[in-house]
Image (cartoon, helix red, strand yellow):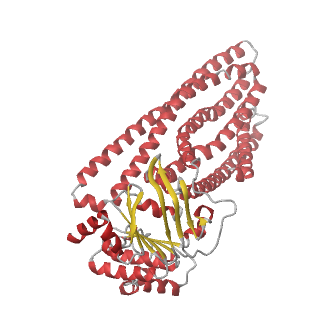
Amino acid sequence: MKKFTWAVVGILALQFIQNYAFTLLPSVGVNFIFELFTPENIHLIYRYFFIALAIVFVRGALAYGSTYSMSVVSESSINNLRNRFFRKLICLPLNYYKRNKTGNFISMTIDDMEKIRINLYEGIIRIISHVAYVVLVIVKLLLLNHLLTVISLSVIPALYVLFKILGNRLRITSRRLQQNVANISTNLHETLTAVDVVKAFAKEDYEIERFGKTAGKYKKTVLKLKVLANLVKPLNEFVIYFFAFILIGIAGLFIVRGGWTVKGLSEYMLLLGILFNPISNIPKTLTSFKVVSASVDRIFSVAGTENTIREIERPVEKKIEGRVKFENVSFAYDKERILKNIDFEVEKGEIVALVGSSGAGKTTIVNLIPRFYDPTDGSVEIDGTDVRNYSIGCLRSQIGIVSQNVLLFNDTIYENIRYSKRDASKEEIIEASRKAHAFEFISSLPKGFETVVGEKGTRLSGGEKQRIAIARTVLINPQVLILDEATSALDSESEHYIQVALNELMKGKTSVVIAHRLSTITHATKVLIIENGEIIETGTHEELLQISRTYKRLYELQYFR
């Protein structure tokens, strides 16, 4: 909120004037009753009536202005915070997403942020305003009767103890509630993104039951939170009214003994009545701070996460030719060693294939090239420069990745292709689609390039999605290409088109291919067999068929299938 300091000061000034105007009403009201209703002063009744009306009008106008201004400041502050949070989130390394649930991030960005806006940002302004209001009224009360006011202030310790006990319980329950919200988000995200699987196995009833259990836990926690939150007001009111009755009794004794007047008591009790609202709202606002603290903790758990993939002070920015070298590279993930002493080189224009069973470490190897991870030991170099010394934007903009798991955005085909190069012209996008053998099927669609592909590209076939993904990669004309067997899950016709498009894309490019089907890598310059995070054998396809039992066994198994 720092950048809105003067706006907050302005809001507090408006609220102070508004509150001060309201504290004038008891004096006006008492004078109206005790002094004007006499024959000689009856002509002043209209003047005091309009004074009171003006006070109420001014207070209302100021209340509207301060409330609207507070909404502007809180919305602007939370918008800045949400943008900063997303910037932090999107820049965190891939392994952070593997350790956390997507539902948590969705819940933080929407639900937690809204709680912070209402309970914290607006609460900060409210609490300052309430405290200033209380001080203002107490000063007036002291001027009317200092002894009675000192006695009345003894209610504060009682309210503090009440708030302390309930506040801690609220904090714990609120944290549990936020986790329940995250669980619902995760449940929804997982179920809806896998709805094809749910329907394929007729598991609608199971998913309904599973969601019901998650929602039931949320309901139980919400009700517990409501019980605690709703206890604050009645208990608060009980304490305040209890002390108010005691004060009336003491004031009555003052009047009986001639130490005070009924007029003075009337004005005092009206001011005390005005004090009730901010006094009761202060514990309520402080309670909301306890509730929102769980959201703040969750936001800061992300904000405080160190980004392990960082640029050096003056990173290298240059055009890449495409020579890739792994030198004694090892990598551990959460203390589990995945790669051990990986050594190989790829010259410009060469094709290197990585072969091995699932979990052998092939994907981890290719993920080190664009710096999705950094090696624990050793170095990955491109054109003789450690990838850690490159500007991340410069490095990744010259590396193309085509995976079997294609992800498209719920936007038009045109925008999905243009995603890799936002300043691309329409001609460049059309040319990229031609090279990816996608132009014909795109042109056959009713809306052509303006066709919306649906969430994750669900309105297109697997082959169509893959060709759009290839066009997106073609558009940046990468010098280094990473392929994760992009044809493994396609029908024969789609596979043909994709293979032709990939062959076009790979011309003159340094290519590192994760091979699931060995028949697709017969043209590779070099084949590396990976097992348990190590390179156990190297050679061409023909050489390995002659000298490697492992490679020959894999090839024959696939051939006979």
Tell me, yes or no, if residue 488 can be seen here: no
Q: Nearer the viewer, residue 74 or 473?
A: 473
Residue 334 image offset from top left, x and y in percent = 47, 47
Q: How many marks?
A: 0
Q: Residue at x 75, y 14 (%)?
A: 258
Residue 182 image offset from top left, x and y in percent = 43, 47
Left or right: 364 in relation to 143: left
Residue 56 image offset from top left, x and y in percent = 68, 45
Tell me, yes or no, if residue 501 can be seen here: yes
Quadrant position of the C terminus in the picture: bottom left
Residue 110 image offset from top left, x and y in percent = 50, 53
Q: Residue at x 62, y 18 (%)?
A: 246
In the rendered image, the vertical position of residue 278 relative to residue 357, given as above or below: above
Q: Residue at x 74, y 41 (%)?
A: 48
Q: Which of the 4 quarters of the picture holds residue 435?
A: bottom left
Q: Nearer the viewer, residue 434 or 169?
A: 434
Q: Nearer the viewer, residue 398 or 21?
A: 398
